[in-house]
Amino acid sequence: MIPQAVRVVDMDAPFDLPRTLGVLQRGYADPAIRVDSGSFAGGPGGTPGAGAWLALRQYDTVGRHVGAVALRFDQLDTSRVRVHAISDSGEALGSALDRVPTLLGAEDDWSEVEFLLDALGDRISTTLAQVRRRHPGVRLPATGGLFDQLVTATLEQKVTHREARHGWRHLLRRHGEQAPTASTLRTPDWLRLPLTGGQLKRVPSWEWHQMWVQPPMSRTILRLAERASSVHRLGASTPVETSSVGELSEQLTAISGIGPWTTAEALQRSHGSADLPAVGDYHLAHFVGEALTGKRTDDAGMLDLLQPFRPHRQRVIRLLKLSGFRSERFGPRLAPEDHRAR
């Protein structure tokens, strides 16, 4: 009998499922997670009718793989989300269900930053507070899958979104296993599980090239694969707290090829990091500078601008992106040359 269960999670406040889980999705054709298409305004009424599919692997506190899980999310009303979990093991099922509230952002408390924005009272803080009131249901998700998020972030290092999403999509389509399914709820054929460390080590070197993954990135992924158990242990032992996540970020940068940008991108999704801006991002500093001052800036300038908002800098960046502001573009979009046939 296939282990499965249904649980209803009440977030006890307006919840915005698509904007919360949407940050986990890498492109419209992500094989591991897809938020249902549709337009949901959000706001105090939440996003009833929204839904998503997510495939995850579960690991215990010592880094042992205990099973795979497919999760179906359906928002029932303003605050409640029904979660149907299907697994290939009872242990993995229990682990995933225990994690679901945290995954949805139940531990992501915005009350302090809301108070801070009201207390600062300047034009920018007032505008950000208005954005938060328009989107009160947005949370920072925390999947717990640190290893998986490090792999996906590594694929995005110093490449275009098109290249990164191509690599992730084809890695899972070629080498990822299909998510568990059941007769009571069939998972989509496209839903694939992230690869384990062992599976990543078995990917032929020439296939990384075909998947548009550059050698420095594939070498970093293999280094992560060699340390998979340690990464799983570190992720499991670190609570969803700003200070603890900051310390974990510093530990992870000891792995060659993993820097502050990669750890920030990963921990924002695995641990709901509220205060780790992605320093080194090609566009982020420009975006923050233009949004807050009308002028582009660099990483140092971005950190200076965000300093008054510590320890909520990532929450403020999330609000800036929700505001609808678009930075000015200069020059043509980067079109990378395709060397895969060489």
Image (tube, rainbow, N blue to C red):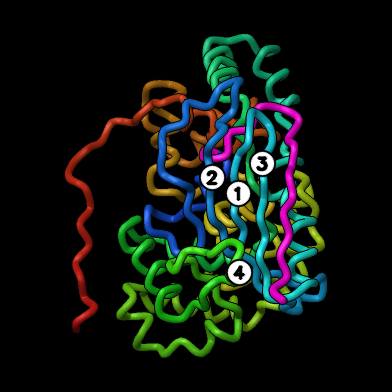
Question: Mark 2 or 4 closer to N-term?
Answer: 2
Is residue 66 within the magenta segment?
A: no
Q: Which residue is mark 2?
A: 51
Give the numbered dot on residue 81: 3
The kind of secondary structure element at disc 4 is: loop
**Residue 95 percent location from the top left of the image:** 78, 64
Residue drawn at (60%, 80%) of the image:
197
What amino acid is at disc 1? Phe
Q: Between marks 2 and 3, how big is the CA–CA gap?
A: 9 Å
**Residue 104 percent location from the top left of the image:** 67, 45
In this rendering, the answer to whether 216 lies above or below 101 is below
Give the numbered dot on residue 182: 4
Category of crowding for the residue at label 1, using alpha-carbon neighbours closer than 10 angstroms: few (below 14), some (14–19), many (at least 20): many
The kind of secondary structure element at disc 3 is: strand
The kind of secondary structure element at disc 1 is: strand
Residue drawn at (63%, 9%) of the image:
121
Q: For this rendering, which residue is in front, 140 or 55? A: 55
